[in-house]
Amino acid sequence: MGLHADQGGVPEARDERVCDHGEEGPSGRGGLEPAPRRGGPSWSEFFRAQADGILACDFFTVETVFLRTLYVLFFIEVGSRSCT
């Protein structure tokens, strides 16, 4: 867009594209397809294999009868599902 004195400072109307995506469209893939699926374990198989080394944790609050708030940080081993 440009301003010209003979138009009294009104922006000049042009037939230009602001964003040129070309053939690939707005996603920007440029003709590339997704990568092929690799061989190997599925997510659930991987998780079961690694479960012995994974800890899960949770943080929550407990409201008591005496209007007190207790803060609890809880850990559990995923492989054995026993509290640590």
Image (cartoon, rainbow, N blue to C red):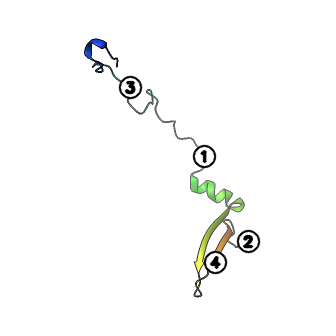
Q: Position of residue 34 (x, y in %)?
A: 48, 36
> What label does residue 40 carry, if any?
1
Residue pointed to by mark 2: 84
Position of residue 70 in the picture relative to residue 3 (left or right): right
Which residue is more in the foreground, 10 or 39? 10
Three-letter code for the amino acid on which mark 4 is drawn: Leu
Q: Quadrant of residue 63?
A: bottom right
Q: Residues within 10 Å of mark 2 (few under 14, many from 20)?
A: few
Q: Quadrant of the C terminus?
A: bottom right
Disc number for residue 55? none
Quadrant in which the N terminus is drawn: top left
Q: Secondary structure at mark 1?
A: loop
- Camera-side residue of 11 and 9: 9
Q: Earlier in the sequence, mark 4 or mark 3?
A: 3
Residue at disc 3, secondary structure: loop
Q: CA distance from mark 1 to mark 4?
A: 44 Å
In percent of width and height, residue 72 lies at 65, 73
Q: Which mark is residue 70?
A: 4
Identify the mark nearer the N-term, 3 or 1: 3
The amino acid type, in three-letter code, at marker 3 is Cys
Marks 4 and 3 close (CB-CB < 8 Å): no
At label 4, counting other C-alpha atoms closer than 10 Å, the crowd grade (few under 14, some 14-19, many 20 or more) is: few
- Report the disc number at residue 19: 3
Q: Looking at the image, is mark 1 or mark 4 earlier in the sequence? A: 1
Residue drawn where x is 26% and y is 15% of the image = 7
Q: Of label 2 and label 1, which has the lower sequence position?
A: 1
Label 4 SS: strand
| Disc 2/disc 3 C-alpha distance (Å) | 56 Å
Q: CA distance from mark 4 to mark 2?
A: 19 Å
